[in-house]
């Protein structure tokens, strides 16, 4: 689901995740983070890092997740040591912070204003 390494990612072409396809590695001192995003972010890589170690990042892509009643778009990061994490808007801009509990799942909602800033509008003629 997520992986650690030092190379750049931006957008991927991802197939949707079907119902029941996400397993989380959580437990004593290890948690997970779900980042909910607008649909137009589908395929974009989202990075997080411990607040006190911004160079130690992990990332995963936004995927379509079919749930009862529709579809949502999210990133699922598991196997995160419990603690406070920075969610990155881009390689140099922090977007927000979230606490990941050991043995639990934290939730973060991507601000709409941050998505709007990254979507370029076609020029009017």
Image (cartoon, rainbow, N blue to C red):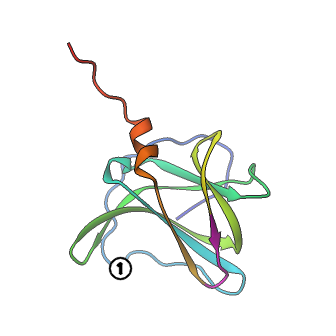
**Which residue ends up furthest to the top in the rendered image?**
125
> What residue is drawn where x is 49% and y is 41%?
10
In the picture, measured across the screen, residue 108 lies left or right of residue 93, that is left
Q: Image point 35% across, 79% down: which residue?
A: 20
Residue 25 location (% of width, % of height) = 59, 79
The local crowd at label 1, few if under 14, some if 14 to 19, many if 20 or more residues have their Cα within 10 Å, is few
Q: Which of 66 and 98 is in front in this view?
A: 98
Q: Is 69 in front, or is 109?
A: 109
Left or right, 102 with reference to 110? right
| Residue drawn at the location 44% of the way across and 47% of the way down | 44
Q: Name the residue under label 1.
A: 20
Write down the region rendered in magenta: 98-103
Q: Where is residue 47 in the image (x, y as percent from the top left)?
A: 59, 52
Q: Quadrant of residue 3?
A: bottom right
Q: Which residue lies furthest to the right in this view?
A: 52
Answer whether residue 13 is magenta in the image: no
Residue drawn at x 48%, y 78% is 23
* Position of residue 16 measured from the top left corner of the image (x, y, whole percent): 31, 61
For the C terminus, the quadrant is top left
**Secondary element type, mark 1:** loop
Residue 22 at x, y percent in the picture: 43, 75
* 6 w.r.t. 58: above or below: above
In the rendered image of this protein, does residue 124 appear above or below residue 104?
above
Q: How many marks?
A: 1
């Amino acid at each position: 689901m997520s992986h650690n390494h030092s190379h750049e990612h931006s957008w991927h072409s991802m197939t949707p995740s079907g119902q029941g396809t996400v397993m989380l590695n959580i437990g004593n001192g290890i948690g997970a983070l779900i980042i909910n995003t607008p649909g137009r972010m589908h395929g974009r890589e989202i990075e997080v890092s411990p607040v006190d170690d911004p160079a130690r990042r992990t990332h995963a892509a936004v995927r379509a997740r079919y749930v009862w009643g529709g579809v949502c778009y999210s990133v699922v990061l598991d196997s995160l040591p419990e603690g406070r994490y920075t969610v990155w808007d881009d390689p140099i801009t922090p977007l927000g912070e979230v606490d990941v509990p050991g043995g639990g799942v934290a939730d973060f909602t991507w601000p709409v204003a941050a998505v709007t800033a990254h979507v370029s509008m076609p020029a009017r003629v």
